[in-house]
Amino acid sequence: MRLEGKKAIVTGGAGGIGRATSLAFAAEGASVAVVDLNADAAQAVADEIRAAGGTAVAIAADVSSEPDIERVVATAQQELGGIDVVFNNAGIIRRTTAVETSVEEWDRVFGVNVRAIFLMCKHVVPIMAAAGGGSIVNTGSGWGLKGGGQAISYCASKGAVVNMTRALAIDHGPQGIRVNSVNPGDVDTGMLRDEARQLGQDQAGFLAEAAERPLNRMGQPSEIAAAVVWLASDDSSYVTGSALVVDGGGIA
Ligand SMILES: NC(=O)c1ccc[n+]([C@@H]2O[C@H](COP(=O)([O-])OP(=O)(O)OC[C@H]3O[C@@H](n4cnc5c(N)ncnc54)[C@H](O)[C@@H]3O)[C@@H](O)[C@H]2O)c1
């Protein structure tokens, strides 16, 4: 059990990658606060963990809101008894060019994908520092490391996640806090199907195209979760500020 006794927060914990990681954290011995905008789905994941004998609490929250983040951190600390690991994973995508993107959509994407990570770190770092350290993992994307079509706000936000992660690692390494990003390629989740809808494309064709990469298939949420477990655990004790790509070779 690589996360025995650890207390973890997972945002977007009801979605594809977040759910798989919440389950993987619990299977490795962590207590998990499953945070999501979708209260019922977050509760279902927490129930699934408890049914398997683990410890979990569901917290409904909008991660772009500072009062919500403060409540999440306070609740997790109270219910779990501390915070050792945070997986900042909630994210949204808008498949539009700069010309097609409204200012409101741009701000929403940055609110969920970028501001939320800043807010979580602002409130959780003092707790981790006081406890002697911790591990923070932020979900970037292959499109945080290279560009992609019709996704201007998403590409900009994920680039920000990757570099914000490095800056956080520099600032808080001396406090024993490691901060890394995990950068998935196309993973079989609701988000990917939603992209096909947003682009008005046939879903089967869109998913077939997503599989075009050296390993010839999309990723599964559990394959991202396995990388996040490693970054969260002491097995990666000398790894900080890194951008780990988990994408079947997509951007190789
Ligand atoms: N699926 C992919 O191909 C892929 C590739 C690269 C990166 N990612 C990233 O992985 C992360 C998880 O994506 P996924 O594929 O599991 O998507 P998903 O849509 O299945 O899950 C995202 C979850 O985040 C939650 N969420 C959205 N906005 C929120 C908010 N404001 N506050 C709290 N929760 C909120 C949603 O309710 C959902 O449960 C995202 O950051 C995404 O950008 C996904």
Image: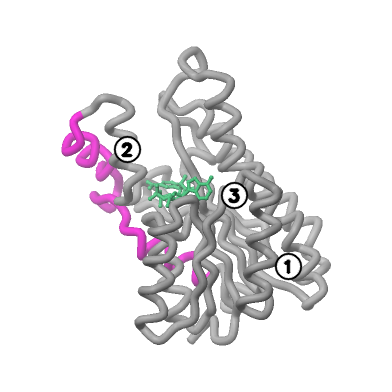
Q: Nearer the viewer, residue 233 or 237?
A: 233
User: Tags 1 and 2 in contact by the CB under 8 Å rule?
Assistant: no
- SS assignment at label 1: strand
Q: Residues within 10 Å of mark 3 (few under 14, many from 20)?
A: many
Q: With 31 as the anchor, is 197 left or right in this view?
A: left
Q: Does residue 43 lie above or below 158 as drawn?
A: below
**What quarter of the picture does the C terminus occupy?**
top left
Classify residue 169 by image quadrant. Answer: bottom right
- SS assignment at label 2: helix
Is 178 covered by the magenta stretch? no
* Label 2 CB less than 8 angstroms from ligand 1: yes
Please state which of the two labelled residues, at mark 1 or mark 2, is closer to the viewer: 2
Whether residue 238 is visible here, answered yes or no, is no
User: What residue is pinned by disc 3?
Assistant: 63
Please state which amino acid type lies under the numbered disc 1. Answer: Ile
- What residue appears at the point 81 percent right and 69 percent down from the top-left corner? 175
* Label 3 CB less than 8 angstroms from ligand 1: yes
User: What residue is pinned by disc 2?
Assistant: 194
Q: Which mark is residue 177?
A: 1
Cα separation between marks 1 and 2: 35 Å
Magenta stretch, overall SS: helix
| Magenta span | 202-230
Whether residue 23 is visible here, answered yes or no, is yes
Classify residue 233 by image quadrant. Answer: bottom right
Q: Does residue 222 lie above or below 244 as drawn?
A: below
Is 215 covered by the magenta stretch? yes
Q: Nearer the viewer, residue 250 or 47?
A: 47
Cα separation between marks 3 and 2: 20 Å
Please state which amino acid type lies under the numbered disc 3. Answer: Val
Please state which of the two labelled residues, at mark 3 or mark 2, is closer to the viewer: 3
